[in-house]
Amino acid sequence: MNLVGSITLKGIAASPGIAIGRAYLLDRRRVAPPKRHITPHEVEAEVARFDEAVRESERQLREVKLKLGAAGTEHIQILEAHELMLHDPMLVDGARQMVRDQLINAEWALKKTTKSVRELFSHIQDEYFRERRADVDYVADRVLRNLMGTSQTAVTEIGPGSVLIAHDLSPSDTALLQQTPVLGLALDVGGMTSHTAIVARNHKLPAVIGLEHVSDVIGSGDIVIVDGSAGLVLVNPALEDLQRYQQQALRYSVGRAQLDAHAREPATTLDGVQVRVAGNIELHDETGLVLDSGAEGIGLYRTEFLYMNRDALPDEDEQYRHYREVVERCGPLGATLRTLDIGGDKLVSHVKLPKEANPAMGLRALRLCLRESGLFRPQLRALLRASVHGELRIMVPFVSGLAEVRAVKRLLAECHAELLAEGVALPRLPALGIMVELPSAAAIADILAREVDFFAIGTNDLIQYALAIDRANEHVGYLYHPLHPALLRMLQFILRSGAEAGIRVSMCGEMAGDPFYTAILLGLGLREFSMNAVSVPVVKQVIRSLDVSACEALLAEAMTLPDASDIEHLVSERLGPMLGTRISREVFDPMSHRP
Ligand code: PEP
Ligand code: MG
């Protein structure tokens, strides 16, 4: 136990809720290998000891794979990549050779070989190899611990009632997290859109990330409170804090349980306006979870996640299977599948991208797909084939103008004709829509609305590009204001253009899932929302508690105000009385929730 006094750490509120428990420190930090020279006659025994550690590592990885079962092919692929690495000549033969040539013990040889393999990767300066470097470390650490008899702790060993503390979680740790009884999570690293944050939210696990030093400060056994709503971690709290949080946690879980009980009921406002609340997913196997949270179909499937954390591109058939499964599970509720949105901050290892000074504005997403038809065509074909099995809608990201939309339509028609010629029965072309997430697309929404079947507003990027604030840059985070008058004007124009053209307009950026903005969005005329699993029941209840005419009046007043902070102030003042007692303040309090 780490005998730190009572302290509070502030990080990023990645997933709401309160977890109170004993810390379980998952120590992924490197172990220090013993270093010693050996005599020539010790060489064979040392190599045999090394081989045994490699075999043991393989056995452990197989066991993790078995435990993982049907939890997702993506994660199995990561483990298989680790297994392959255990046979990598550079790493394994390299270490053996070093024992023989330099007469050093196996731990030391492995450490040296790992270092040179990592260096090789870092010289290449490619995102893909940066990712592989972490895999090399992970595998080498496992072998090293087996050599030293200090086995690597597995997430699956964590007992009930624990709060998981770690520097970072590997993709395989994150995958296994779903099967452990952990109550909450606190990490040194990570951002709102990191895979761990997404998994935590979708699994309703309170989480605070980006804490920087939490794994240094907390030791296994410490009492920890993770307040995932406020982004706070309390270590060995004072008795009064503990009691206060125990009561708060109880009230929160009662409030959540009430909401969850109504999650599947429709989101109809007090004055009878029907609103659709769909879910966002990153991986096909999250579909069930999101639907169970009350989502009415999938409003955004970020298909690029299928391309990540693996060694080769998914082929047309694999994509078809994933897309078909999502669309079949959604049934008549339907699913909107977004085509590849890679580049910028989203790296996909095996797609070679040019090194760019400004990747956020570079060759990414649709631009890349239109240039690399070898990448795009298999996806369009897979989507068309899957569309036979249900209500599938195709959506393209990062549209900046009309020519791009027309190019997509041409390509889609070509793929359609190709499949028909191959004898695939495709009775109709699925609906085609675009993400409105660039200011240029927002400004010509009236023109684009005549060309497509639906719009989905991507506020994450729209805010980034309209206000010129890098999504991932903490130094300009203070400028992130979804209620900025410039943005409200854009949203109003997009929604009006959609209505005039008679097409559906939804919103799938983070703004849609934050209950603080629901009233303003209803006032603007938004009737389709899409968000992460944990937000669905909350936003649905907020919608049920509001009256559209009151939301329109609130918006009209907001539009007269000159600055984002004035509008935020107005919303936080008015929302409480508008909601009345229809939603528990433990789950959502507009006064304390103010951005
Ligand atoms: C957005 O930009 O708002 C969006 C939903 O897409 P992503 O977050 O994947 O860029
Ligand atoms: Mg986007």
Image (cartoon, rainbow, N blue to C red):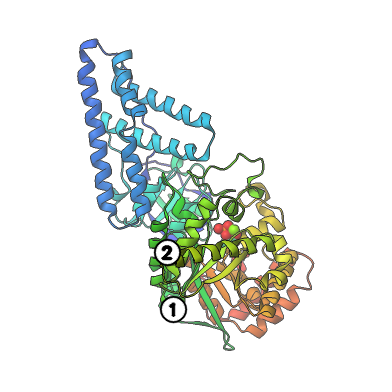
- Residue 364 placement (x, y as % from top left): 60, 50
> In the drawing, does residue 131 fall left or right of residue 460?
left
Residue 341 appearing in the image: yes
The residue at label 2 has a CB less than 8 Å from ligand 1: no
Q: Position of residue 535 (x, y in %)?
A: 50, 68
The residue that disc 1 covers is 332
* Lateral position of residue 250 relative to residue 505, left or right: left
Give the residue type that dot 1 points to.
Pro
Dot 2, how many residues are within 10 Å of its Cα: few (below 14), some (14-19), or many (20+)? few
| Number of numbered markers | 2
Q: Which residue is at a point 53% across and 37% down the rendered structure image?
A: 126
Query: Which residue is more in the foreground, 434 or 282?
Result: 434
50, above or below 521, in the image = above
Q: Quadrant of the C terminus?
A: bottom right
246 or 504: nearer the eye? 504
Q: Residue furthest bottom?
A: 271
Task: State which quadrant residue 431 falls in.
Answer: bottom right
The front one of 476 and 303 is 303
Name the spot of residue 330 as percent of width and height, x first: 42, 73
Residue 569 position (above or below residue 43): below
Quadrant position of residue 426: bottom left
Q: Which callout, 1 or 2, points at the residue further toward the start of the chain?
A: 1
Above/below status of 177 relative to 294: above
Q: Residue furthest top?
A: 40
> Which residue does the numbered mark 2 point to in the structure image?
422
Depicted 220 relative to depicted 195: above or below: above
